[in-house]
Image (cartoon, rainbow, N blue to C red):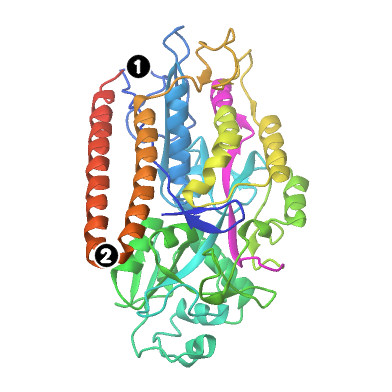
Amino acid sequence: HEVMKGDGKINSGGASRRQRFALACAALVAGSMCVSGARAAQSVQDVNTAGLERFQLHGSGTTNPSKLIWYAMDLLEERARSFVRMTYRSVGSGTGETDWNTDAADFASTDYGLSSIVSGGTVNDYLQLPFQIGAIGIFHTVPGYGSAELKISACTLAKIYTGAITMWNDADIKADTGITLAAEKIHVVFRSDGSSSTYGLKGYLNAGCNTVYTGTVSSSSFSSLLSGDAYHGVQGSDGVRREIAARAYSIGYLDAGHGHADDLAEFSLKNTEGEWLVTKEGNPAGITSADIPSVVTTAVQNAYTGASFSGDLTGASFNLFNKAGSGVWPICAFTYLHVRKVYSSAETAALVRAFVSFILSDEIQAAVSNFYFFPLDTTFLASVRTAASTGITPAATGSVTDWTFETSTIAATATSMGAKTFSKKRQAYVDYALEILESDVASLQTSVATLEEESHDAPSLKPLTGLAAFDFVMSFAALIIGSIALHKARSNGRI
């Protein structure tokens, strides 16, 4: 797999999905935290019985940060003494925006800023908090060409995604690449659902070639422009990467890290400085690797702090498309948490504050790169934290205790065993098992590398050495995965 290095490049690594405990909802009276059917309102919390408090938080939106959000939710659930249930529907930014605008979620996440109108037309009643930076890459499966070996301009890309170019040997593609490619049909992959990746690509095409791409910048699908057996609409980033890999001569767009994790070949793109760049690290094929975080300039940061992370954040000052600067990748985006300034329940407001605080914490920011994205720099992160801590206020009257966090290093306090304390000293056994697995796999990787080096002089033994090591790794992983599945199955019955 690929992860993001601290220098803004993409490198090899991985991330693990943690166990979630399943909280079964008992039959509760009206107004309690569990209801039948679809939710259509902000969450309420059950704090009526001391020692039996139940809390919930629900969001939806972009698929890109879903694994990071699930990871953070898992940790909070297992660290809470009370029953805490958190969910996030990975449905795409467009659906998340709809859920948000209809008041059906406690928070939303998108990879583009929203307008200031929400929930019946009330202006500026919510915060838009960036928590990570991503890059959209353009990937292909043209046989014989790897990452950075082919270039594509914004106008050529716009013609492909408006149906004007349909063959790989088109003169515009030859002009970009300097190569006459095969006379093969271009299989165009795009998101069929409302997608922030689509929003990002349209933003880039609008900024880089608005004489060809004349449509609006939105998350809506390209389906109205593309029809026929060479056009493939799919849902989710995972759907895009699988569809691109499914056939030769495909092209598609998705968040760069996940494309590299599947070893998809990436097109080089030209930025505003005239530099041909790729997101993959290591300057492949002699093409410079982009410095993704450098897109967040002081001017961009000032735009957000000047707007107090609220209001209409759809303008050019806030997006990260075709920004100037050496090494700047032309299709970047923040991922946002959209949270209300005012919640109908003070307890829900307190839980939202705690969740947002955790997403912006050093612990989760350090994990962002494991999920193929980039954390915020310390200066901008401090501004986002301030906006979150001061901007979310309860509407209800009365005193409500905020959630607290106990780290693994601090001494116990009077609140350590409290109903509203997330303690890092509470863990699940699966976390311990995964730590052992990661350590053993790292040791096995070192052993395989040593065996390969020792077998250099005996080529006939090398395949057997590698196969034996691979079989051992897979067997051990299967054992651990089986143990985790058993642990999940048992925990699912816990009330």
Task: Decide which of 162, 18 is in the foreground and name it.
Answer: 18
Is 331 magenta? The answer is yes
Picture coordinates of residue 119, whole percent (x, y): 56, 41
Question: Which residue does the numbered mark 2 point to in the structure image?
Answer: 458
Crowd class of label 2 (few under 14; some 14 to 19; many from 20; radius 10 Å): few
Quadrant hosting residue 213: bottom right
Give, as a single range, the part of the protein colored magenta.
325-351
Task: Decide which of 327, 386 is in the foreground and name it.
Answer: 327
The numbered dot on residue 290 is none
Please identify the quadrant where the C terminus is shown: top left
Q: Residue at x 64, y 47 (%)?
A: 376
Image: 425 above or below 274? above
Picture coordinates of residue 423, whole percent (x, y): 51, 20
Secondary element under disc 2, as helix, strand or loop, is loop
Question: Which residue does the numbered mark 1 point to in the structure image?
Answer: 28
Picture coordinates of residue 322, whole percent (x, y): 65, 68
Quadrant hosting residue 415: top right
Picture coordinates of residue 276, whole percent (x, y): 60, 76
Residue 195 makes an appearance in the image: no
Please identify the quadrant where the N terminus is shown: bottom left
Crowd class of label 1 (few under 14; some 14 to 19; many from 20; radius 10 Å): few
Q: Residue at x 64, y 60 (%)?
A: 320
Residue 366 makes an appearance in the image: yes
